[in-house]
């Protein structure tokens, strides 16, 4: 086994890991070594082809098809240099005050989250999209929302030089999206931080990390690792876990550390999501321009958020209910489909959790609570009204039976779309906002880490990703992950005497 040493090791390179790497990079000039380990590959610009099957396999864990234990929900999360910041749409919202106050994390106030978030809004060029990059899919959402009595707000996005390819979820082919792969990681490397890809952290010991570095599989995309393939044992003074809400709890659990807080892996929230479509009589522009420019926030009032979206044929087909001629007919209407992503704002409960199997692989257990089902139902009803308000002639509503509604059904939406039609495993549910599992809090009785991300009982081991969230954020989580990771980095610098 190869033996290495680093003063600081960061596991993961996404919103959390990339942020911490950039903040700690000045330590290198002071003689400290900072190492980032990323399980996925690093792709060169020309390898972002925008082809659905190719990019899903290259950039997502399990090709984007990671399933919960009972197979009722698909969880999508990135795996590569930059983590999920490579495959999300760039939406950059600041956490609501009500959420941060509800968390009750000691010493963490909303004003601090706003201040730290503003830093990364500026650093990653967050702004509103110009009018010329708004496509019909987004304009129709605004029109339909107004007709249905909702207020559509525009998403701030972390873009620079967007060409409107609409390929955000497959990795931007134009280097426009300003994820950690474009901003924080290159900045950290310029200052001497070492980033090693294709490096899977197998196990944690006391201030030691077991790592398996893999070769490039036949036909796979991405550069070879900068380390030779093989097993490594790394000694580290400080370890920061930023492997995501699935990866971080799973790593802690399979490592078998003595005295691990009992809440490890528990309290997972995911924003269960439905992809809904409305068919228009004439073609609309839905696969050019930015796919996600507007949203309707009903989290506080009704437990859901609606977002504009555009998914490519395979993902769209997977999320449409039914088989045979009716399904085929709707897919042939793809150029005329308006799309809305429905997100239910679920709450953290102990039984929704990450565990590991005998081989140490992550297993996600998730139960759709009655409140989540009600939120999905309310959101589907709201989306149907928006579709019809925008001029759609038919609406696909998986919580209706039959799932296709005609304009003549507009006055019966509440009757036709009902909780009783939600059947786990029969309705296609997905999720990409994975949060919780190593929650911040007071002590071991209510959390896994303290308010600075330190694992209770192990001050050398910190967490800096979405698993820190004590409960659902209710919005897209990436900017808040960066804000909390920035705070975790301050804690590390303070421990090392590198800041006042």
Image: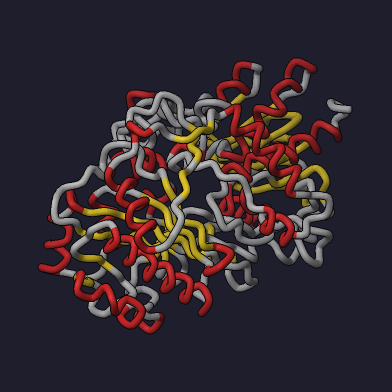
Answer whether residue 108 is visible to the viewer in this image: yes
| Residue appearing at x 58%, y 69% in the figure | 352
Q: Is residue 93 rendered to the left or right of residue 309?
A: right
Answer whether residue 355 is visible to the viewer in this image: no
| Residue appearing at x 34%, y 46% in the figure | 138
Q: Position of residue 199 (x, y in %)?
A: 54, 37
Q: Is residue 380 rendered to the left or right of residue 12?
A: left
Q: Which one is nearer the viewer's eye here, 115 or 436?
A: 115
Residue 19 lies in quadrant: top right
* Callout count: 0
Q: Position of residue 258 (x, y in %)?
A: 78, 59
Task: Note whether 221 is above or below 145 in the view shown.
Answer: above
Q: Position of residue 38 (x, y in %)?
A: 55, 37
Q: Which one is nearer the viewer's eye here, 109 or 211?
A: 109
Q: Quadrant of the N terminus?
A: top right
Q: Is residue 25 rendered to the left or right of residue 396?
A: right
| Residue appearing at x 80%, y 61% in the figure | 259
Q: Which one is nearer the viewer's eye here, 155 or 47?
A: 155
| Residue appearing at x 37%, y 80% in the figure | 418
Colouring scheme, one of rainbow, by chain, secondary structure, one colour: secondary structure
Q: Which one is nearer the viewer's eye here, 196 or 47?
A: 47
Residue 237 lies in quadrant: top right
Q: Position of residue 122 (x, y in %)?
A: 60, 28
Q: Quadrant of the C terminus?
A: top right
Task: Note whether 463 is above or below 183 in the view shown.
Answer: below
């Amino acid at each position: 086994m190869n033996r290495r040493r680093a003063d600081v090791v960061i596991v993961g390179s996404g919103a959390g890991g990339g942020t911490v790497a950039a903040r700690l990079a000045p330590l290198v000039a002071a003689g400290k070594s900072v190492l980032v380990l990323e399980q996925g590959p690093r792709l060169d610009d020309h390898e972002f082809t925008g082809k659905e099957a190719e990019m899903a396999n290259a950039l997502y864990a399990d090709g984007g098809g990671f399933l919960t234990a009972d197979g009722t929900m698909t969880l999508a999360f990135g795996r590569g240099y930059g983590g999920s910041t490579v495959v999300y749409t760039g939406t950059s919202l600041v956490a609501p005050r009500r959420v941060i106050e509800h968390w009750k994390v000691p010493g963490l106030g909303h004003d601090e989250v706003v201040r730290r978030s503003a830093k990364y809004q500026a650093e990653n060029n967050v702004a509103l999209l110009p009018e010329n990059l708004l496509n019909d899919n987004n304009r129709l959402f605004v029109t339909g929302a107004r007709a249905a009595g909702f207020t559509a707000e525009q998403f701030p996005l972390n873009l620079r030089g967007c060409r409107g390819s609409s390929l955000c979820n497959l990795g931007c082919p134009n280097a426009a999206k300003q994820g950690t792969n474009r901003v924080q990681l290159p900045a950290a490397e310029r200052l001497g931080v070492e980033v090693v890809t294709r490096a899977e952290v197998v196990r944690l010991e006391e201030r030691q990390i077991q790592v398996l570095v893999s070769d490039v599989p036949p036909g796979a995309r991405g550069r070879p690792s900068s380390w030779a393939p093989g097993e490594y044992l790394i000694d580290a003074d400080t370890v920061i876990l930023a492997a995501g809400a699935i990866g971080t709890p799973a790593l802690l659990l399979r490592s078998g550390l003595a005295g691990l807080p009992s809440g490890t892996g528990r309290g997972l929230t995911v924003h269960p999501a439905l992809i809904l479509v409305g068919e228009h009589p004439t073609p609309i522009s839905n696969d050019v321009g930015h796919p996600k420019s507007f949203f309707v926030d009903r989290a506080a009032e009704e437990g859901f958020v609606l977002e504009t979206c555009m998914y490519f044929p395979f993902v769209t087909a997977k999320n449409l209910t039914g088989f045979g001629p009716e399904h085929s007919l709707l897919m042939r209407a793809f150029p005329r489909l308006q799309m809305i992503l429905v997100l239910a704002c679920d709450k953290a409960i102990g039984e929704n959790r990450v565990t590991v199997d005998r081989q140490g692989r992550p297993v996600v257990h998730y139960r759709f609570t009655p409140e989540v089902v009600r939120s999905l139902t309310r959101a589907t009803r709201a989306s149907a009204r928006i579709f019809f308000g925008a001029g759609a002639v038919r609406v696909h509503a998986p919580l209706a039976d039959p799932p296709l509604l005609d304009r003549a059904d507009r006055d019966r939406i509440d009757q036709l779309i009902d909780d009783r039609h939600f059947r786990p495993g029969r309705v296609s549910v997905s999720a990409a906002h994975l949060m919780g599992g190593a929650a911040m809090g007071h002590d071991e009785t209510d959390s896994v880490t303290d308010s600075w991300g330190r694992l209770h009982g192990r001050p050398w081991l910190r967490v800096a990703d979405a698993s820190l969230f004590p409960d659902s954020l209710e919005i897209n989580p990436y900017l808040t992950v960066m804000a909390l990771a920035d705070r975790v980095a301050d804690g590390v610098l303070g421990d090392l005497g590198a800041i006042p």
